[in-house]
């Protein structure tokens, strides 16, 4: 979650999973068990610059914003988009226009 405290144990746990990119979400206000409101993703190598003794919140780090594409998008088009825009990750969304607009407004994807 975006309110995760980045202490030594948490940073170690993130690294131990071995992922280079980790989705960051915000809990749904109306349902605290719903963790599907994605804000973006964290490039885990950014954690190398964090002093664990500072105990910063994850929300203080810059997140990468994915581009949302339709499941009907041709795979060649997806690869072209990734390459030309220098993107690291895309999300497949039923309504990509609405999803991209939501992310443009710094709101979580529902």
Image (cartoon, rainbow, N blue to C red):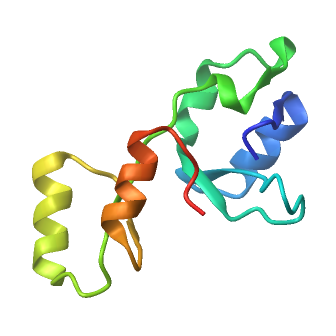
Q: Can you tell which quarter of the image residue 104 is in? A: top left
Query: What residue sits 68% from the left and 30% below the top?
Result: 59
Q: Nearer the viewer, residue 34 or 30?
A: 30
Position of residue 46 relative to residue 37, above or below, is above
Residue 65 left/right relative to 39: left
The picture places residue 7, in percent across and down from the top left corner, at 86, 27
Query: What residue sits 86% from the left and 29% below the top?
Result: 8
The picture places residue 106, in percent across and down from the top left corner, at 50, 38
Query: What residue sits 38% from the left and 62% below the top?
Result: 98
Residue 13 left/right relative to 87: right
Residue 48 left/right relative to 6: left
The picture places residue 15, in percent across and down from the top left corner, at 70, 46
Looking at the rendering, in which quadrant would you find the C terminus?
bottom right
Position of residue 22 relative to residue 55, above or below, is below
Q: How many marks?
A: 0
Tell me if I can see residue 50 in this picture: yes
Tell me if I can see residue 89 in this picture: no
Residue 48 left/right relative to 57: left
Furthest residue in direction bottom, as rendered: 72
Query: What residue sits 16% from the left and 47% below the top?
Result: 85
Q: Nearer the viewer, residue 77 or 6?
A: 77
Q: Can you tell which quarter of the image residue 92 is in? A: bottom left
The picture places residue 41, in percent across and down from the top left corner, at 53, 48
Q: Nearer the viewer, residue 24 or 98?
A: 98
Q: Nearer the viewer, residue 49 or 42?
A: 42
Position of residue 29 relative to residue 5, above or below, is below
């Amino acid at each position: 979650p975006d309110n995760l405290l980045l202490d030594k144990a948490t940073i170690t746990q993130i690294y131990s999973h071995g992922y280079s990119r980790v989705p960051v979400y915000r809990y749904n206000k109306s349902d605290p068990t719903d963790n599907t409101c994605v804000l973006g993703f964290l490039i885990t190598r950014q954690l190398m610059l964090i002093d664990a003794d500072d105990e910063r919140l994850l929300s203080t780090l810059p997140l990468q914003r994915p581009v949302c594409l339709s499941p009907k998008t041709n795979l060649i088009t997806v690869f072209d988009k990734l390459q030309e825009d220098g993107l690291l990750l895309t999300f497949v969304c039923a309504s990509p226009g609405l999803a991209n607009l939501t992310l443009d407004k710094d709101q979580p994807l529902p």
